[in-house]
Image (cartoon, rainbow, N blue to C red):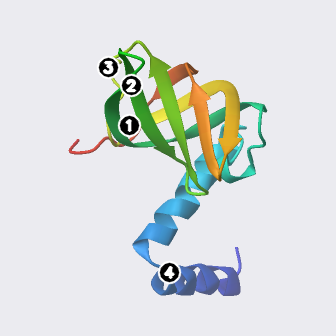
Amino acid sequence: MGKNSLLQRVIHRIATSNADLESEEMQRAVEAESAVPIRACADRQQVRLRGTVANVTVHPRGGHPALEVELRDGSGAARLVWLGRREIAGIEPGRNLAVEGRVSCRRGERVMYNPRYELLDGPRAGG
């Protein structure tokens, strides 16, 4: 590794915000998992996404609960919806998650209903 390369990395880290550095790290994890960046998802595409849970809410849909999760991967966000669920053990803000399913794109928002999921090791909020 050359001195210029090391110097460029140091300058990049100093000149880049923490949020941007976290975004870059998340995008590297997406690439390492052979997942699709959220911003690159096309409507009706079957994909594997990887990211961090930003928030979890329960919204009623047609009188039934629906667990909604915002997943962020550094390139964008997707809303994951599990119909008929109030909670899923282990899915909480800060948790790293991989999901597979068909994505729907409407008005710039990406949504995936009842995806298969995998809880991944890694940082969790408060832990």
Q: Residue at x 60, y 30 (%)?
A: 112
* Circle 3 Cα neighbour tier, 10 Å, few/some/many (<14 / 14–19 / ≥20): some
Q: Residue at x 42, y 18 (%)?
A: 62
On the image, the x and y values in percent for residue 22 come to 47, 62
Which circle, 2 or 4, is nearer the viewer?
2
Which circle, 3 or 4, is nearer the viewer?
3
- Callout 3, which amino acid? Glu
Label ID, residue 16 = 4
Residue 30, compared with residue 61, is above or below; it is below
On the image, the x and y values in percent for residue 7 come to 60, 86
Q: Quadrant of the N terminus?
A: bottom right
Tell me, yes or no, whether the two marked residues, 1 and 3, touch with CB atoms within 8 Å: no
Secondary structure type for disc 1: loop
Residue 89, compared with residue 108, is above or below; it is above
Label ID, residue 95 = 1
- Callout 1, which amino acid? Arg
Tell me, yes or no, whether the two marked residues, 2 and 1, touch with CB atoms within 8 Å: no
Going from N to C along the chain, the mark reached first, 2 or 1, is 2
Going from N to C along the chain, the mark reached first, 3 or 4, is 4
- Callout 4, which amino acid? Thr
Going from N to C along the chain, the mark reached first, 1 or 3, is 3
Label ID, residue 67 = 2
Q: Nearer the viewer, residue 10 or 69?
A: 69
Secondary structure type for disc 3: loop
Using the numbered discs, state the Cα–Cα distance from disc 4 to disc 1 in whole angstroms.
24 Å
Q: Nearer the viewer, residue 4 or 68?
A: 68
Going from N to C along the chain, the mark reached first, 4 or 1, is 4
Tell me, yes or no, whether the two marked residues, 2 and 3, touch with CB atoms within 8 Å: yes
